[in-house]
Image (tube, coloured by chain):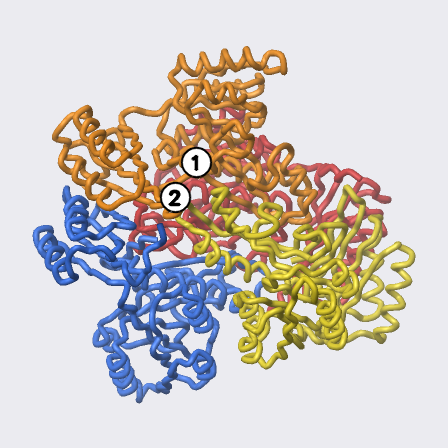
Chain colours: A yellow, B red, C orange, D blue
Amino acid sequence: MPASPPTQTATLLVCCPDRRGIVAALAQVLHGHGANILEADQHTDREAGIFFQRIHFDAREMLTDRATLERAIAEVAGRLDMQWRLEFGDRLKRVAIFVSKYDHCLWDLLLRHRAGELRCEIPLIVSNHETLRDVAEQFGIPYHVFPISKETKPAQEEAEIALLREHDVDLVVLARYMQVLSADFLQRFARPVINIHHSFLPAFSGARPYHQAVERGVKLIGATAHYATSDLDEGPIIEQDVARASHRHSVSDLVQRGRDVERNTLSRAVRWHLEDRVLVHGNKTVVFE
Amino acid sequence: MPASPPTQTATLLVCCPDRRGIVAALAQVLHGHGANILEADQHTDREAGIFFQRIHFDAREMLTDRATLERAIAEVAGRLDMQWRLEFGDRLKRVAIFVSKYDHCLWDLLLRHRAGELRCEIPLIVSNHETLRDVAEQFGIPYHVFPISKETKPAQEEAEIALLREHDVDLVVLARYMQVLSADFLQRFARPVINIHHSFLPAFSGARPYHQAVERGVKLIGATAHYATSDLDEGPIIEQDVARASHRHSVSDLVQRGRDVERNTLSRAVRWHLEDRVLVHGNKTVVFE
Amino acid sequence: MPASPPTQTATLLVCCPDRRGIVAALAQVLHGHGANILEADQHTDREAGIFFQRIHFDAREMLTDRATLERAIAEVAGRLDMQWRLEFGDRLKRVAIFVSKYDHCLWDLLLRHRAGELRCEIPLIVSNHETLRDVAEQFGIPYHVFPISKETKPAQEEAEIALLREHDVDLVVLARYMQVLSADFLQRFARPVINIHHSFLPAFSGARPYHQAVERGVKLIGATAHYATSDLDEGPIIEQDVARASHRHSVSDLVQRGRDVERNTLSRAVRWHLEDRVLVHGNKTVVFE
Amino acid sequence: MPASPPTQTATLLVCCPDRRGIVAALAQVLHGHGANILEADQHTDREAGIFFQRIHFDAREMLTDRATLERAIAEVAGRLDMQWRLEFGDRLKRVAIFVSKYDHCLWDLLLRHRAGELRCEIPLIVSNHETLRDVAEQFGIPYHVFPISKETKPAQEEAEIALLREHDVDLVVLARYMQVLSADFLQRFARPVINIHHSFLPAFSGARPYHQAVERGVKLIGATAHYATSDLDEGPIIEQDVARASHRHSVSDLVQRGRDVERNTLSRAVRWHLEDRVLVHGNKTVVFE
């Protein structure tokens, strides 16, 4: 019995007030349409009284078409006051990677993508510098440069958003992009943006976290992948990881050690997002690993 | 919305040939009897074509009694050629801990039990030595000594089994018990036995694993918690963990470092078993953490 | 060639402005007195231009007595503008453990002490509650209760200091002691105090760190062992560690998971201090693991 | 006080029967020649009675030339029956990377080299397949293909050794090279060869370790970097690391997860070797991290 080809699977993500019978209701609907559930994971936030579920199913032998299934889910969702999203595996998400001068996260994402670890399309790379054009070219990905100054920022972000829309980008990944996206950008792009911050948030938010880490003499350094919001470094955290540090490490040693933590943390967060494993509620995430 | 008191929850564990509709069928049955699903986790072994599921539900508002629910599940199970087990939270498993002279795993289990991390009763501790009687007494647990020699072993095991039956013991935990239980013991006790082996199996099976580790010059040492079978160190693995080692560590250093790994690995395995998170299939485990 | 019995070894800790020849000078002095160097570790803080070294040596075959060796070291130290400390292994440090109601760190320290992992004497345990008296008694250690209220605090700390002096205590370990020691206490006790804070400092300093962690939705929780100073949670960090957290963990789940991280982090920090592996400089530590 | 430029530092590695005064003798010699010790680490294998030391020093202000220093060290070494090696930082080691079809370790080594994490020259890449030529070309490194069949192996290895000699290669790194180097190759090349094995040795030596891991149902997978010897998978271990595995992981999942462990383990081992931190004694390593 072979694994279902990802192109013929689908994922249903739901979130609603908790009550009895939700699991059975959704299982029935899917079964009734011939969907074969491959994975199902759920969580109830007891304090908030919210129910979350991710159902990953095989759509090869569905008895009805997608529209019919969606109508059926919508009907149940209406009764249960449910927010839901249905993603079909044959439609790859389109990702734009934003970079500046550091290349380690970019290399990691592009190599994992080529190795098949990240199911998505990467139609373009955006940067505020020319520096990494050759990396993009090695992977045959268009590289767009938008130099940013205090004066040009609004116009450049305008142009970036136009470009993202033109390429129908679903997700922006800030791979050590050294510019803060304006609240206006985030609001108008209106799709998820994942950022990697090079510290174990909420410790050492803001600038130069490795300098802060040496200053404080911590024994671990970390990285945090989170959805970008208008509150800098305050968005919902998707993943965090750490590495040992000691008195022997200068700032530049930590920068080097940090590279591994940053890229691994970011790529895990991006993969989970691409596999529809992340639900955001308020300022927190539910990650169905 | 408070957490459901564990005494009023139940867990259904199932295993059957994979086919469509299993998830829906079980969800329906439980819902139909007023059970509210709190957690559900599933796994399909594609190669073997076997479906596994753990459903943890709130039984407070069940519309029928247990016998009725069990009949209903049995009926579905019959149709699906399903092996199943239904465990109610108000019935605590009864655990017997076997020890010899090392006390670190015993202390860890007893302190975690007292702290509420291990939901079970511990009616007795069995040993082949007097050494740890005072530990048992500090927790008010009867301590039974069965000295073992080549000659006395059969008779002593006979007596141990009688004692375990008398106390209706569900699980035996070998907490660094330095005697091999005979195949006859395991067959006649016929209930699970969890052992902790002080190496990362299959490396360094058999005697003196820390000596073997120093001999080979490995850079990590480990521990393995597994169900005991008649094939020594070959039973289904429940959990494993490791710690760093280096050229600086003598055998006695590793013995000391190993204690932390052994006790943490064993206590996790025991907790997962007590929470009905472990399914055994062939020589492997499915652990729904 | 057997390990040197710890009672016949000694440790020299030095700190001075960096310059050439320090290593050779100290090695010569020790060799000249018949001390056999077993371990030597050093560090230079290039920014501050400070040299640190720990030399652990076998004193069994010393050609001179301690006073002579100390005079010789003092002479070199004078030339090199060096701060130094010489600790002989036959003099065990005397430790007082402060606790309140949580027992996990206390158990861990006492069991590791009994197992020989912590080379020290523990002449007394101090608490602001009766709660843990039975634990102390199981180890035959006097348990002194000083209830603290806003009004009684100064007088009680006075009494505690008198008691610590009477027992010639070298180190106070705050094993989840839920009272803040006053700046006056720290200044007058004038010996090291190690505290365990149940978060990955500087994140979540202050009260209820696990509540803060759930609030922020972090994916790792941590613990920090540090020397207590008059700036709460700001003292020099000795050791930190973390454990995974997820959306599934309530505050009480984190409290439970946190116990393992707290006790392991604290016991490592205490062991390193007892083995004279920690040097404090400014608000940071040099830890020669 | 800036860090010493690595090109003006040197490292002395020694190994000799343990006795008193070794540390002082070496420190004196180096000091006498104006060498400033930056790091010194030592280890005594008590069972074997062998002393190991690594001394890293600043050679900028040496009062004599290298030859004079070497003569002085040789003189002391003679008295102490010492094996020694003196490596100057201005002479970069020359590394040949051997690959087959897997590219993850190759990318990792080449990117870390470009990022300055691996101080060496990489004059050539050798393979038994054309597959990875484009990777080599992206870094401007000559790529030599030697197809291997049972018949051609001796002649091809002959040619490989000639090529390695021609390029004065100091170290061969087998980055998932899927051919076993013959005992004859190792003996005639007579310089270190580092291999990465994709399991936690001694578990799962030989072929298809991930298949063996799934078969046995282990809960951790690992990787082992070791010096290649004529006994396959039996050489001195330099570094090992692990990652979690579970019932959910198929062989192909483990292959993917394993890639991260393999490349991180191999690159650490190679870095330590390049920084002269590894001493081999018998079948074990002393690694001065």
Left or right of residue C118, residue C78 in this image: left
The image position of residue A200, as x and y in percent, is 57, 49
Task: Kindly identify the residue that appears in the image at 83 percent across and 73 percent down.
Answer: A66
Give above or below for A42 relative to A170.
above
Earlier residue among tags 1 and 2: 2
Query: Which of the 4 image quadrants contains residue C277?
Result: top left
**Left or right of residue D189, residue D264 in this image:** right
- Of badges 1 and 2, nearer the viewer stands 2
**Residue occupying the point 51% across, 45% down:** B194
- The answer to whether residue B180 is seen in the rendering is yes
Give the amino acid at mark 2. Ala
Q: Chain of mark 2?
A: C
In the image, residue C23 sits, relative to residue B40, either above or below, namely: above
Q: Nearer the viewer, residue B258 or A244?
A: A244
Q: Left or right of B125: which side holds D27?
A: left
From where the camera sits, is residue B232 visible?
no
Chain under disc 1? C
Who's the residue at 34% across and 50% down the image? B246
Asked if the residue at tag 2 contacts the one at tag 1, i.e. Cβ–Cβ closer than 8 Å, the answer is: yes
Q: Residues within 10 Å of mark 1 (few under 14, many from 20)?
A: few
Which quadrant holds the C terminus of chain C?
Answer: top left
Total numbered circles: 2
Question: Closer to the camera, C59 or B7?
Answer: C59
Disc 1 target residue = C282
Which residue was labeled with disc 2? Answer: C48
Q: Up-down: is C227 above or below D172?
A: above
Q: Nearer the viewer, residue D60 or B284?
A: D60
Spatial CA distance of label 1 from label 2 is 11 Å
The N terminus of chain C, quarter of image: top left
Residue C3: x and y in percent read: 23, 38
Looking at the picture, which amino acid does disc 1 mark? Answer: Gly
